[in-house]
Image (cartoon, rainbow, N blue to C red):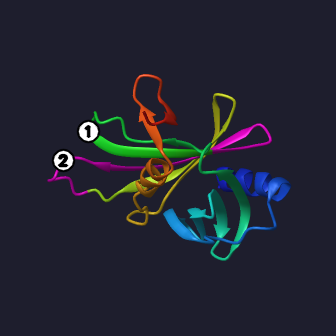
Amino acid sequence: MRAALLLAGLAAAAASPGWTACQGDEAFSCQIGAKRVEVCYWKGMVTYSFGRKGKPELTLGEPLETVAFTPWPGIGSSLWETVAFQNEGYTYEIWTSVERDPEATEPRSGGVRVLQGDQTVAELNCDRGTATPMDTLYDLKDGIGQCWDMETRSWGLCN
């Protein structure tokens, strides 16, 4: 509950009234109680929104070229991805993960982590079974000629 109140308080201070929830194509979504998390792509912008469907409390946007998307590095027991948005000293990191084991019974999970610097100030998990994959962002980055460099853990122009 405290995390939800923190997110709502931060949202009230920084909401962008010009965007509506998922204008364009959806890259990720999940349900957190009565609220919804959406990451969308439209006309070169990636947007994050949090709140009731159709009435977000917080909407942040970042150009596709510069959005902080981290793809799965190819190792580990789960496939995971994150995308982060900055706002007034806070980072809103949206994540999704699924076990690689074909016999795993847990559905894909996801959530939102709010950081102030390196400190986590709130973390909300998606309701069980509602998180969607985020791999569309990888395809979009690839489509504009960007490649992920595993050594530097950053996006750059493909050679």
The reply to whether callout 2 and callout 1 are in contact (CB within 8 Å) is yes
Where is residue 136 shown, x and y percent of the image? 43, 57
Residue sitting nearer the eye, 114 or 154 = 154
Does the magenta portion include 98? Answer: yes
Where is residue 60 shown, x and y percent of the image? 71, 55
Q: Which residue does the numbered mark 1 point to in the structure image?
A: 77
Mark sitting earlier along the chain (2/1): 1
- Residue extending farthest bottom: 54
- Taking 24 as reference, is 134 above or below it? above
Where is residue 94 shown, x and y percent of the image? 54, 49
For this view, does 122 lie left or right of residue 130?
right
Residue sitting nearer the eye, 150 or 128 = 150
- Taking 76 as reference, is 136 above or below it? below
Q: Which residue does the numbered mark 2 point to in the structure image?
A: 101
Quadrant housing the N terminus: bottom right
Where is residue 11 shown, x and y percent of the image? 77, 56
Does the magenta portion include 92? Answer: yes
At horizontal 69% and vertical 55% (from top left) the residue drawn is 61
Residue sitting nearer the eye, 124 or 151 = 151
- Which amino acid type is shown beneath numbered disc 1? Ser
- Residue extending farthest top: 151
Secondary structure mostly taken by the magenta-highlighted segment of the chain: strand
Quadrant housing the C terminus: top left
At horizontal 43% and vertical 61% (from top left) the residue drawn is 131
